[in-house]
Amino acid sequence: MSYPTQQDVDAMRADGYEAATIAQAQARQQLGERVTSLKHAIQLAFADVQLGEGTGLYEAQGLDDFAGEQACAA
């Protein structure tokens, strides 16, 4: 999913978009900034986490779906 940038909002203003449309774009821009910040925080929180001998997410989904051993290992 992509979010408008400040440059996109500025271009909308320059092109004469309606105020309501610009306001919606600004709200989506702010949402995009929060999403980016949250993604960064999650990446930092899990940066040093290693699976070790456990079961990974994709392997667990394969097991749930009764996939074969080869498919789960992939």
Image (cartoon, rainbow, N blue to C red):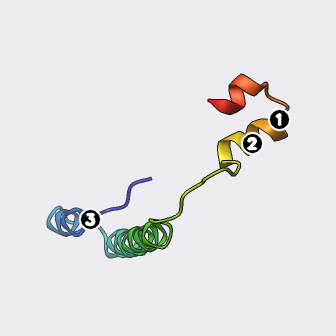
- Dot 1: what SS? loop
Name the residue that disc number 3 marks.
5
At 67% from the left and 48% from the top, the residue drawn is 57
Q: Does residue 37 lie above or below 43 as drawn?
A: below
Q: Residue 2: image x %, image y %? A: 39, 55
Q: Determine whether, in the image, residue 5 is placed left or right of residue 45.
A: left
Q: Which mark is residue 38?
A: none
Name the residue that disc number 2 marks.
61
Q: Residue 19: image x %, image y %? A: 32, 75
Q: Which amino acid, mark 3?
A: Thr
Q: Determine whether, in the image, residue 47 is placed left or right of residue 69.
A: left
- Dot 2: what SS? helix
Q: Residue 61: image x %, image y %? A: 75, 42
Q: Which mark is residue 65?
A: 1
- Dot 3: what SS? loop
In whole angstroms, how far apart are the C-alphas of marks 3 and 2?
36 Å
Please tell me which of labels 3 and 2 falls first in the chain.
3
Q: Tell me if mark 2 has few (under 14), some (14-19) or many (20+) residues whose alpha carbon lies within 10 angstroms of its own.
A: few
